Image: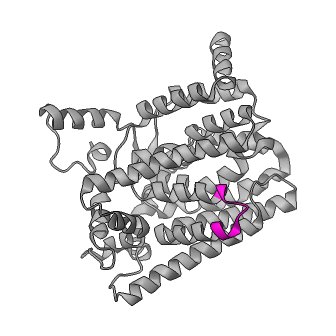
Amino acid sequence: MHFLLSRLESLILGSPTRLITLLIFCAFIKIGIWYIPNLELSQALARYPFANPFTDPKAHYLFWNWLSPFIAYMLGLKTWLRFFLLHLSFAVFFIGLFLWHIYHYLPKADAQKSALLFFVLPVSGTAFFWVGPDALTLLLWVFAFISAKRIFLVLIVGWLLGMQHFEQSLCAALALLIGVTLSHSFKSASVVSRRFCVATLLGIIFGKITLIAIVASYEITVNAGRTVWLEEHFWVVLSQFGFHFQLIVWSTLGLGWLAILKYCDQGKSALALLIPLLGLILLVPFVQDQTRVLALVSFPLLFNFVLLNPRFLNTVSTTQASLFFLLWLILPWGWVFAGRTQGSVLSYDMVNLLHRLFGWFTVPEIRDYWPFYW
C-alpha cells in the first residue's frame, strides 16, 4: 500500500500532461458517453427557435433551454447527430477550458490537486454521461470565472446563462453570492468578489427578461416551464427522494464529500461554503435528475472555494490526494436519476457501436433511456 501511494504521489507531483491523460482515460472507462434522453426534443427547437415545437405542455420547460438550440440554428445544424456533436464539443471545451484555467491560475502542485478533485466530482462526468444543454451551462460558468476581473464580460456571460438555463444559473449564482458574502464575515478565502456575483446575477436575470421579450415579440405560446412540470410530478419526485435519500445525497458530490470534510478543517470560516451548499441540497427533493442538478448548481460554489482556492489546496497533502485518486479508481460511477442509481454507460456505448457497424446484438429500437432502465 505504501509503495502504491508513493507511486501515485510521484504521478500527482509529476507531469501535468501525464496526470490529465490518465484522468481523462479513467473517466471515460468509468463513465462512458451518452446523451440526455430528451435531446431529440431539444433538437426540434433548433430547427426554428422562434416557435414552440412542443405539443405536450409538460415538455414546454425544454423551450427555456433556448440558447444552445439557437446556436445550432444559427450554425445550420439540422440533424440529430450534428446537434449531439455540438453539445459534445461544448462538454470537451468545458473540460479543456477548466484545466487550462487552473494551470494558469494556480501553482503547478495546487493545479494538479485541483484537476484530480475536479475529476472526482460528478460534475466533470455529468457533461458526458448526459450530453446536452448542461455542457454549455458549465462552459459559460468557466468563462465567467476566467473573466472575473472584467465585470462587463461577466454581465454578458450571465446574460447568456439566463437564456440557457435560468433556474439552475440563478440558484448557483445566489449560492455563490451568499458564500462570498459570508467569506468576508468569516475572513475565509474567496477567489471572486461580491461584485462578480452581483454582476453574474444581474446578467442572468436580464437574460431571462430577454428571452421573455423574444417570446412576446414572436407571440410564442409557451407555459412557465419547470413550475408546470413540477406541479404535475411533485409527489413523484418527493417520494423518490424519500425512498432513496441516502444514495441521492451521496451521489450529488460523490467522493467530493471527502473534500468538503477536509474543508471543514478551516473551522468557522468553512461555513462560507457549508451554509450555501446546504441550501442547494434542499433543492434535491424537488427534482427528478438529482445528481445532475446539484452537481451543476454547486459547481460555481466549489469552483470558488475548493478548486481555485490555493489556501485550501495547500492543506491537501499529496498522500491525501493519492487516496482520493485511488478511491475514485476503485469505486464505481454512481449517478442517480429518478431515485435509481445508474452506472457507467461504456458497455452500452460499445454494444450500440457494434450494432451500428456490424449488426451485432439486439438493441431497443429507441435507445434514449436504454442504459437507465435496462
Tell whether 298 sits left or right of 31: right
Total number of numbered labels?
0
Percent across and percent down for residue 280 are 61, 60
Percent across and percent down for residue 300 are 63, 56
Say if 51 sits above or below 74 in the image: below
Percent across and percent down for residue 64 are 42, 72
Residue 356 lies in the magenta stretch: no
Q: Which residue, as the protein is rendered here, is positioned at the far top?
A: 3
Percent across and percent down for residue 142 are 59, 54
Tell whether 3 sits left or right of 187: left
- Closer to us: 165 or 244: 165
Say if 26 sits above or below 51 in the image: above
Q: Residue at x 60, y 74 (%)?
A: 203
Query: Could you tell me if residue 201 is visible in this image?
Result: yes
Looking at the rendered image, the quarter that the N terminus falls into is: top right
Tell whether 372 sits left or right of 24: left
Say if 197 sits above or below 11 in the image: below
Q: Quadrant of residue 202?
A: bottom right
Label the magenta part by its dominant secondary structure.
Answer: helix
Looking at the rendered image, the quarter that the C terminus falls into is: top left
What span is in magenta? 145-154
- Closer to us: 182 or 97: 97
Q: Residue at x 68, y 15 (%)?
A: 6
Q: Residue at x 42, y 37 (%)?
A: 31
Tell whether 26 sits left or right of 144: left
